[in-house]
Image (cartoon, coloured by chain):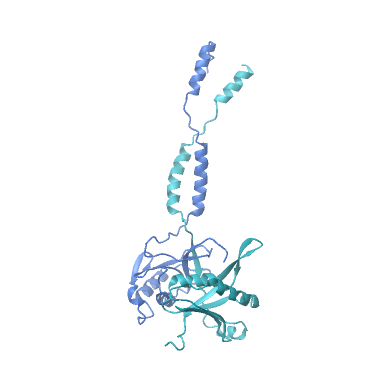
Chain colours: A cyan, B blue
Amino acid sequence: MSRRRQRRQGRHETPEINITAFMNLMVVLIPFLLLTAAFNQLTILELYLPQVGAPGVEEKTKLPELEVILRADSLTLQDRKNRKTYHKQEVALKEDYDYHRLQASLQPIKRQYPQLSTITVLAEPGIPYERLIAVMDHIRAVNLTQDGQLSAFELFPDIALGDAPAQQGKR
Amino acid sequence: MSRPQSRNSRRYARKQIKKIPSLNLVSLMDIFTILVFFLLVNSSNVQPPSSPELRLPEAKVEKPIEPSLMIELTNSDIVVLGRKVADATPYLQPESDDLIPGLIEELRYQASRGGQRGDSDQLHATLMADREIPFQLLKKIMLSAAEADYSKMSFAVIGQAQDAD
């Protein structure tokens, strides 16, 4: 057999893999996975539930007890212990709060007390869930651009919920 | 393979071999392989509620949903594991009770069957609530869950891409 012939024969005998089984597998797998695919990822926000029965520990610390009070027409960030209001904004009814200003006033507090991670959100009965989640999301962490790169900075991730106190003068 | 006698017949034999139809499926296999891996990564065992009455809020959290007791809450129903346990409408009134007996009963039953416990051995429930739910109803759900010893509570939300604030 000449060398030329050998080469020609080699070209014709391309190895054929039987991929029928593989195709069957794909045809079954792809519709199945398409059905279970989560195109919008479900995630969770965890609630912080203060441990009842250990109140003595918190009394000793000098950390402020931060509260965010959500009302239909205003948002207040205050320290319950020192009766100090850090931030207050008034919004028109049905309008969203200005979360950027809230975060801007939370950041210096976090810088002053880096170990503080708890905050309480107090809401009026009529506050919709969506707004509550938006507030919790914005006080949990802040996204800052640093050196051209986006990174999340933790603010106050341990969020407790409660009822807003009755408003003075509007009873 | 028998050796062809003449040049003509040899050429004819070669033509015959070439005529066998063969599909080139390599690129199709590539696509399928990539698709399968993409879908495997994207798949999750927790199905989002598809009811138009239950639209989850959105937040920029990345913590994936954990297996736990799912409480679905719309403006009309309170549903635990696909079964309606109470009507939500009466609890939307401000003067209604703080606790929801139907929900507490169902949660206690689920807890007695060995509910999902988190890392700290607490019973863990995840709330899927419509974005329009007012806080007073939410509070009643949480109080009822706490009453039934579900002390760890999380809110299911739709994760969003991170962007600068």
Residue B123: where, in percent of width, then height?
Answer: 47, 71
Q: Is residue A68 visible?
A: no
Query: Picture coordinates of residue A106 (x, y %)?
Result: 59, 75
Q: Is residue A79 left or right of residue A126?
A: right
Q: Residue A23 location, x and y as percent? A: 46, 40
Residue drawn at point x = 57 percent, y = 69 percent? A141
| Residue B92 or residue A72, whichever sits in front | A72
Residue A119 visible: yes
Which quadrant is home to the C terminus of chain A? bottom left
What count of labels does the image hold?
Answer: 0
Q: Residue at x 37, y 62 (%)?
A: B52
Looking at the rendering, which quadrant does residue A36 occupy? bottom left
Residue B117: image x %, image y %? 48, 68
Quadrant where the N terminus of chain A lies? top right
Residue pictured at 45% horizontal, 89% vertical: A169
Q: Is residue A53 above or below residue A42?
A: below
- Residue at horizontal 48%, vertical 20%? B16
Judging depth in this view, the residue of B120 and A39 nearest the camera is: A39
